[in-house]
Image (cartoon, rainbow, N blue to C red):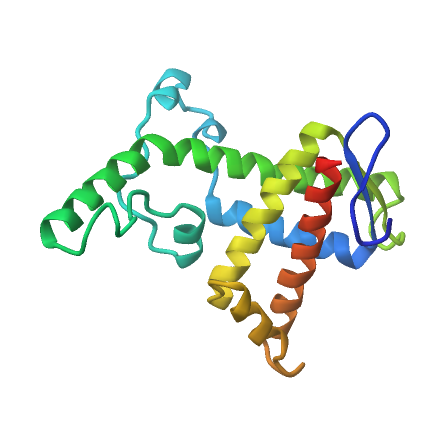
Amino acid sequence: MPGTFEPLPGGGAAVALDDVEISIIRSLAAQLLELIGPGPAEDASADPLAELFADGPSEPPSDPVLRRLFPDAYTDPAKFPDTAEKAEEAKAYSAEFRRYTENDLRAGKREGALAVVRGLDELTMETGGAGAGGGVLRLTPERSLQWLKALNDIRLAIAARLDITDEEDSEILYRLPDTDERKPLVMAYLWLGGLQESLVETLMD
């Protein structure tokens, strides 16, 4: 099962990862966590009821990666033709939608990235620590879904950094010379795509 997920008896998925692969995925997941930011519950003084009813932001994020992870809603040009009035209407709908959904979306993405980091840390401990050569990561069905979503979020973040909007862009970047500073990130994007695809296929079996 090297490099690709395979099904486990009774559900779930497993994949063999070496030290370098573990380090890459963990680093990218940790960067995603840092970008998303801590949740309200991580503030010891937070009121649980206040957190439950707290509104999210109404403006889109300024960071291009966060804009890719939390895009505006109601931007279909067929529904909102290019007129000043309709543009304002679309903006108002998007702001309202973001206000009531972004906190939950952030919490879900944070939970997925944390599941990746914790799962890899557990694997590293089980196999004797960093430098032991890696091991086989085994995921329950629930953890498998968390990993699937987190891998998608990590690839979205990379795509935003590389300005990838479609498959043609990634193919062009793949042909970059090895001396290009973007090449390692491109290779990570493509590798994670294959990993994600194998997990999808595993869960559909």
Residue 204 located left or right of residue 102: right
Residue found at x 62% / y 47%: 151
| Residue 197 place in picture, x, y as percent | 68, 50
Tell me: residue 146, above or below residue 24. Answer: above
Count of labels in the image: 0
Q: 74 or 15, which lies in front?
A: 74
Q: Nearer the viewer, residue 90 or 103?
A: 90
- Relative to residue 170, is residue 6 drawn left or right? right
Residue 167 rendering spot, x and y as whole percentages = 55, 64
Instruction: Indicate whether 49 appears above or below 165.
Output: above
| Left or right of residue 69: residue 151 | right
Identified at 40% across, 33% down, the residue is 103
Q: Does residue 163 appear to the left or right of 153 in the view shown?
A: left
Q: Is residue 56 visible?
A: yes
Rendered location of residue 42, percent (x, y): 49, 30
Depth check: give the residue in front, 93 or 124: 93
